[in-house]
Amino acid sequence: MTENRNTNEYMELRELFRSGGNLSSFRTAVDGAVGLSAYFTELHEKGECIQGFHPSGVGIMKNTGEIRIDPKLIKTREEGSLPIRYAPPEINLGVAKPGEGSDRYILAVLIFQLLTGGDHPLHGSRYMGPVMTKRMKEMCYGLDPEFIFSDSTGRNLPDPKIHVKAIAIWNILPGEIRDLFARAFSREAVLNPEKRPDEKEWNRSLVAFQNHMIPCQCGNILKDGAGESFTCTACGKGHQITHRIKINGDAIPVVRGNRIYRSQVRHESLPAADEARPEAIIVVSGSDHNKMGLRNVSEDTWKVLTTKGITKDVGKGEVVPIKSGIKIRCGDTDIEIAATDQQ
């Protein structure tokens, strides 16, 4: 997460949502969501909350998902305004003031829009008319909000012709993330903003999702499981997971682009912005696209124990080949590469 970088390198979220979420990949959207959760964590650690907000104040790098926050448009110390689309019902109804509860609503809306390409979590079939009247806005954003994927009344469900991407993404999201959205936009959270998921819950769940992401060439995202073979439900292509990275009781599939975050390998207290930084990324190793490696993208030198029992130093930018039995001291944690048939 970076501030005060050249804005030409980033795309405003407002423009991104208008264009239908044209990022380089769905993984990039998840990276952006991780960065947003880290920003809100950092904000609350400093005892601040958002007093004024505009979506043009948040930018994302289209190829990496790196988030940029413009402090001029994200006011944290002075009175401002929260647009009706991003303010929680209690703010729109005038019964509460901005605080951590409203921040967590803003965060949930932004994450939902990032993952779905711009769809608003309350804009279901009930509000699909050509123009939202003032009364419709009052109902949607204040008096009668209904999350499109947990509407018990059936009045505000997603439209299968309009919400095509949102429905597809919802179906591949882990249950843990779907539960976070349901909590964030529940009627209970309208009455009790403290019931909304906090930024650390979002961060943990999004990092776990990123760890286990298996993208298909057709654009579909496959759900990871304990096995080693997967078939894409969209195009029928088969996928083979030959190795996994064992870390803290987890087994991350070796898939190009999957990464290990700093928060997973460092047990000391870290600034929120540092927790969201990758420590290692799985990459193609050499000219053979079937050979994978784990690239050190941290500032530290790893201690690597090879399969021959030799200890080697691996610095920033260097790659450890994916071979069963290799052990790596990464941060203050030992990780191990293992073949799927040996787990």
Image: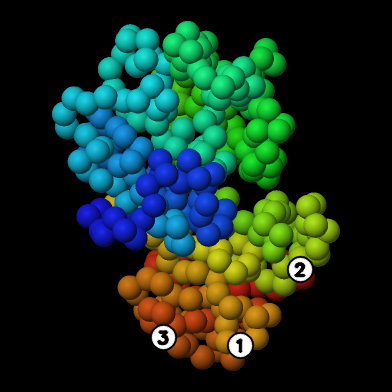
Percent position of residue 131, x then y: 52, 19
Q: Secondary structure at mark 3?
A: strand
Identify which residue is drawn at 48% across, 41% down.
18
Residue 275 lies, with reference to residue 53, above or below; the image says: below
Foreground label between 1 and 3: 1
Q: Is residue 31 visible?
A: yes
**Which residue bears the numbered disc 2?**
240
In this rendered view, identify the residue nearer to me: 281 or 170: 170
- Local packing at callout 3 (Cα closer than 10 Å; few below 14, some 14-19, many 20+) is few
Quadrant in which the C terminus is drawn: bottom right
Residue type at the position of mark 1: Ser
In this rendered view, identify the residue nearer to me: 160 or 18: 18
Quadrant in which the N terminus is drawn: bottom left
Q: Which quarter of the picture shows residue 248?
A: bottom right
In this rendered view, identify the residue nearer to me: 196 or 10: 10
- Local packing at callout 1 (Cα closer than 10 Å; few below 14, some 14-19, many 20+) is few
Q: Are marks 3 and 2 in contact (CB under 8 Å)?
A: no
Identify which residue is drawn at 22% across, 43% down.
71
Residue 153 lies, with reference to residue 60, above or below; the image says: above
Percent position of residue 122, x then y: 54, 24
Percent position of residue 320, x then y: 52, 81
**Which residue bears the numbered disc 1?**
287
Residue type at the position of mark 3: Asp
Left or right of 2 on screen, residue 19: right
- Specify which label sits upstream in the sequence, 2 or 1: 2
**Which residue bears the numbered disc 3?**
313
Foreground label between 3 and 2: 2
Identify which residue is drawn at 71% across, 59% down.
218
Residue type at the position of mark 2: Gln
